[in-house]
Image: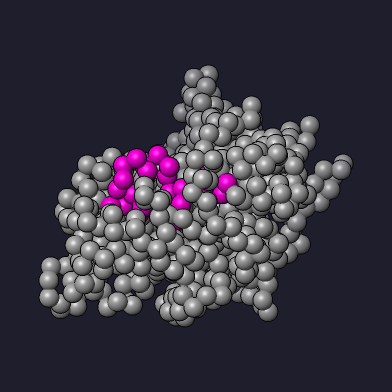
Amino acid sequence: MRKIFLLTLVSLILVVFCFIGMQELSAEKPAKEKVGEPIKIGALFDYTGPVADLGPKFEAGLELALEEVGYEVAGRPIKLIIEDSATDVTVAFEKFKTLVERDKINICIGPLMGDAHLAIAPYAAENKVIVTSLFNGMYENIKYKTYIIYPTTVDAQTYPFGKYCYEKLGYRTMITIGANYAGKIGYANGAAKGFADAGGTVVQQLWPPVGNPDYSPYIGAFKTADVVLYALEGPGPVARFIYQYHQAGLKMPLVTITQDGDYTPESLAELGDIALGIPGQSSYTWQLDTPENKKFVEGITPKIGKLFPSGAEVKTYTLGKIVLAGLEKTKGDDSYEKLWPAIVSLKIKSADGPVSFTPDGVAITNMYITTAEKKGDNYVLSTPIDTVRIDPEFIEASRGWVPPK
Amino acid sequence: MELVLANLVNGISFGMILFLIASGLSIVMGLMGIINLAHGALYMVGAYAGWTIAVQWKMNFALAVIVGGIAGALVGLLIERGFLRRLYKQPNEQVLLTFGFVYILSNLVIWIWGGHRRLQFTAPILYGSMEIAGMPFAKDRLAIIAIGAIIAIALWYLQDKTRIGAIVRAGMDDKEMTTGLGINLDFIFTVVFLFAAFIAGCAGVIGAQLIGAYSWLGTDILLYSLIVVVVGGLGSVQGSLLGGLVIGLIDTFGKALFPQFAMFTIYLAMIVILLVKPSGLLGRKS
């Protein structure tokens, strides 16, 4: 009897925890009392899994964009519905279906993972739901014309950085190590293509699985090259790799991509001096000297309680701005037929720089070369060392990489 | 040659971590017949407790290892005294209960320490690498091998050369006879469970030098440790050590030499070993 009672009590406690958790994760943001049916914006962020630390950052950026307009556009209130995509393709797809079928959204911000976008794209096209990428914009989804591929395709984001490694940094041979999923494969291969097109040779490519805890076997398998480019799935894996690379005592210099997303204040504070001086490709740095960025940094830093925002917060902030600008243009009409052409005709200036679009919905943005630096006692992402405008030609030029044997 | 030597050190150090966590799991399963799926979560709790001591409060790393062990033991005490002792000889309920604790402890860890993954940490003296025969080796990995070897010798001595070890072995072989000789097996069970949880907590801090601490660490390391227990054999320290080293080396060399099959190498090894020796490499014959 006592045993049954205890088991029942434990089960009830577990159910309550699960219920509370589900309520938190699928919380609808309150809309003010406004005239007109609410515009429903869905969002898929990762609150669990290998990149769980990015979910709250993405949420903060999007919330800031909506708070700046009082959760209202063109006289219609905005209802934001967020689900946890759990860094899992299957979960992301199921949650997307829930947002479309239960919540009747017409636009979705995220998810993060490129593989999830590849899975979602046909269903989104079939249901005429506009989807935006966060970092991982997949070239394969251009054809559906329901995608806002921001900051641009993964390959095109890093293609100019590959050229930079050859032309400006002077490296001639490269090893790449990238997380084994579509997004980071695209990033690594885009940089490899740029490097090779400039005249360099990629001698080795390694692909550890997502969530890999120990990079030492891969580090131990490195051949010799002028530079090692790492493209791992988030701040945690990046920090782990840098630490283990340093512990292994290898002397080949490191370079990286999506540094703005991976060099968060928390990870830099933990890495300390060993993170300094690694050049990287970023689509944003908090030290950009523009009025739009200053306004963003002033608004987001009290919200996140950190020294500086990373690329995660600015991505959803800019995407929020893009969606709001599109809705202003359509006077609040959030149907695909009106909103899609409105968004791709936009030219705006956001915190991460000027944003415009190709007719296929691929964003044209800036690429910045950055590194980690020490300011006083704090480790931060630097001001841009160099700036490159992503040329629309890069979208095709970055494709067709043939890996080394 | 460098590839072989570097990954030999990597594989043995990883294998030592697996041995530390699997040894406790193996003894608990062998003696008490309890399938404690929360054992990996105890490792995780130890890692976070150690992080608080060594990184947040900037105290001694050795102290962090002890505190990690104590944290694991306290949570283990709660689980064993509060819940598991009511479920002896009920394996289905044990599995459900202990798996539930994995979720509870993972979410507690997120509440207390946040979802942000904690970087590896080590004692300042173990930071960086040292050159041996012209090749760099990570100091923390060499230290893990040394610590693991010392603990393995101590556990083997405890198991094979002490009275308490004899009682544990007797309890594994024949519970009824052991109880009939007037030995309080209930008390022994609790002590063994606590000791296993303590070792798991310590292993969490020692292993944090390689893989840090994160909220689903318990699930990740549990999978590895179950494979080590199966491969090494239930109920023996020597089996856990051999199983840990075998799995550690196969996993490391598999990733280094066949990265496209990195997800499968240890499972293939487990299948082959079980086909040849179903009770594991050094499993106790029932």
Residue B40 as seen in the image, left or right of residue B139: left
Residue A156: within the magenta? yes
Looking at the picture, how far across and down is residue A43, in whole percent?
A: 31, 59
Q: x and y percent of residue A275 in the render?
A: 67, 61
Residue closest to the eye, A385 or A242: A385
Which image quadrant for residue A389?
bottom right
Q: Inspect the magenta stretch and tell me whether residue A372 lies in it.
A: no
Asked if A62 appears above or below A358 in the picture, the reply is below
Task: Name the one closer to the observer, B263 or B84.
Answer: B263
Residue positioned most to the left: A36
In front: B234, or A210?
Answer: A210
Foreground residue among B44 and A157? A157
Q: Position of residue B129 (x, y in %)?
A: 77, 52
One can see residue A121 in this view: yes
Residue at 68% x, 72% y is: A374
Q: Name which residue lies at 36% across and 47% down.
A: A360
Magenta range is: A130-159
Q: Residue at x 16, y 67 (%)?
A: A38
- Indicate whether A379 appears above or below B30: below
**As drawn, which residue projects farthest toward the top?**
B276
Q: Is residue A55 left or right of residue A159?
A: left
The spot of residue A50 in percent (x, y) is 46, 52
Q: Residue at x 50, y 70 (%)?
A: A309
